[in-house]
Image: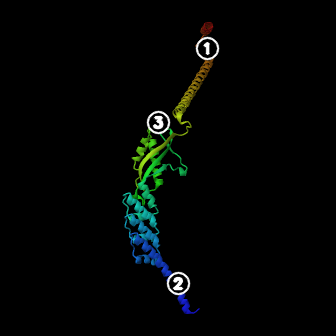
């Protein structure tokens, strides 16, 4: 194979490659021109050859925008693709925002897309608000656990309707923050209620109080409404007899408290009785000690001459008379008792 043949093959390959490129660019140019979204063929060649940008992708995005009445420069679409953005998603979001009379620029939509947020879903949610369950059942939390001032524990499930706030979508808090704030607000609102009955009778008071707290500040959403979907008393299987069961439990608790108080009083009475017996025994021991000193005192009186024999006999007679009267008085009491 000579050099001329090799050169001929190279020329044919280059020509074929150039033909394919021109054909693809021409197809995109014709499609854009026929759709009323004209693009210079030189710009398309620059995209295809120099910047390696998919020509058909940019052309389709520009055609969609043009058909919706939005004029987007191909430089913006090309730059967003080179920044690893989702060009079609941004264009569709701009079209949806324009049809819904929502002010949204290409720069804002591109920034939201490059920030990792789904701009099309954000615009859709802004037009059609979505409902978020609070708490999130996907994380295993079926109910919020709140306690009123009377100590009754309530299980609450709420549904939060939110609308996307496009101005705060970049840097704003996500759905998890909304769920956490609403849960905290509900627990706080229930805790300020005097009785669990107030919550069961007027659950809308809880939702209004939480909604007025401005929980959507610095978030990517605007809270439209908070609805209490379910309220139940924890630990009650039959919700129809919640009041009776709680009253029974409360009466049982009061009974136990009164029994504890009575037991305390009885213990105090026993302690006082034991103390009194100890004092009586102490006094009796002192009397016995004093009586033991009487014979010694009499003997000392005989010895000192302060007591005579006649005086001693008189004292003995008095003591005998006293003992006889006491025995007679005891017998009369026994007869009366019979």
Label 2 CA crowd tier, 10 Å (few <14, some 14–19, many 20+): few
> Which one is closest to the eye, mark 1 or mark 2?
2
Tell me which label, 2 or 3, sits earlier in the chain. Answer: 2
Q: Residue 120: x, y in percent?
A: 44, 60
From what the image shows, is residue 63 above or below residue 278? below
Q: Which residue in the protein does label 1 denote?
A: 302
From what the image shows, is residue 292 above or below residue 141? above
Q: State the CA–CA distance, disc 2 to disc 3.
A: 86 Å
Residue 178 vs residue 338, the one in the foreground: 178
Q: Residue 79: tell me if it is visible.
A: no
Tell me which label, 1 or 2, sits earlier in the chain. Answer: 2
Where, quadrant-wise, is the N terminus in this rendering?
bottom right
- Residue at figure coordinates x 48%, y 80% from the top left: 19
Give residue 296's quadrant in the image: top right
Q: Which residue in the protein does label 2 denote?
A: 13
Q: Which residue in the protein does label 3 denote?
A: 197
The number of discs equals 3
Q: Residue 94: x, y in percent?
A: 40, 62
Q: State the CA–CA distance, disc 1 to disc 2.
A: 160 Å
> Which one is closest to the eye, mark 1 or mark 3?
3
> Which one is closest to the eye, mark 2 or mark 3?
2
From what the image shows, is residue 332 above or below residue 121? above
Cβ atoms at labels 1 and 2 below 8 Å apart: no
Where, quadrant-wise, is the C terminus in this rendering?
top right
Label 3 CA crowd tier, 10 Å (few <14, some 14–19, many 20+): some
Residue 306 vs residue 173, the one in the foreground: 173
């Amino acid at each position: 194979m000579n050099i001329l043949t090799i050169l001929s093959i190279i020329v044919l390959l280059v020509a074929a490659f150039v033909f394919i490129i021109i054909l693809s660019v021409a197809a995109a140019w014709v499609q854009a021109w026929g759709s009323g979204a004209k693009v210079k063929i030189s710009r398309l060649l620059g995209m295809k050859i120099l910047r390696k940008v998919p020509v058909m992708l940019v052309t389709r995005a520009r055609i969609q925008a043009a058909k919706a009445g939005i004029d987007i420069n191909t430089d913006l679409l090309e730059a967003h693709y080179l920044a690893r953005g989702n060009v079609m998603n941004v264009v569709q979001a701009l079209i949806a925002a324009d049809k819904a009379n929502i002010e949204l620029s290409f720069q804002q939509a591109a920034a939201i897309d490059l920030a990792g947020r789904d701009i099309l879903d954000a615009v859709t949610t802004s037009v059609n608000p979505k409902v978020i369950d609070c708490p999130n059942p996907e994380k295993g939390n079926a109910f919020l656990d709140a306690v009123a001032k009377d100590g009754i524990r309530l299980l609450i499930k709420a549904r939060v309707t939110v609308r996307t706030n496009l101005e705060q979508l970049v840097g704003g808090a996500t759905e998890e923050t909304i769920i956490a704030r609403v849960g905290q607000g509900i627990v706080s609102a229930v805790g300020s209620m005097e009785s669990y009955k107030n919550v069961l009778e007027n659950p809308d008071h809880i939702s209004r109080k939480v909604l007025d707290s401005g929980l959507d500040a610095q978030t990517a959403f605007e809270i439209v409404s908070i609805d209490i979907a379910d309220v139940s008393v924890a630990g009650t299987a039959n919700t129809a007899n919640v009041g009776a069961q709680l009253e029974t439990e409360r009466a049982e608790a009061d009974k136990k408290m009164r029994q504890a108080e009575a037991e305390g009083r009885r213990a105090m009475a026993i302690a006082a009785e034991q103390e009194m017996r100890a004092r009586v025994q102490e006094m009796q021991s002192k009397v016995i000690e004093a009586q033991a000193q009487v014979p010694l005192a009499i003997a000392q009186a005989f010895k000192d001459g302060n007591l005579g024999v006649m005086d001693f006999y008189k004292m003995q007679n008095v003591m005998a008379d006293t003992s006889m009267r006491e025995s007679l008085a005891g017998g009369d009491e026994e007869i009366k008792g019979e």
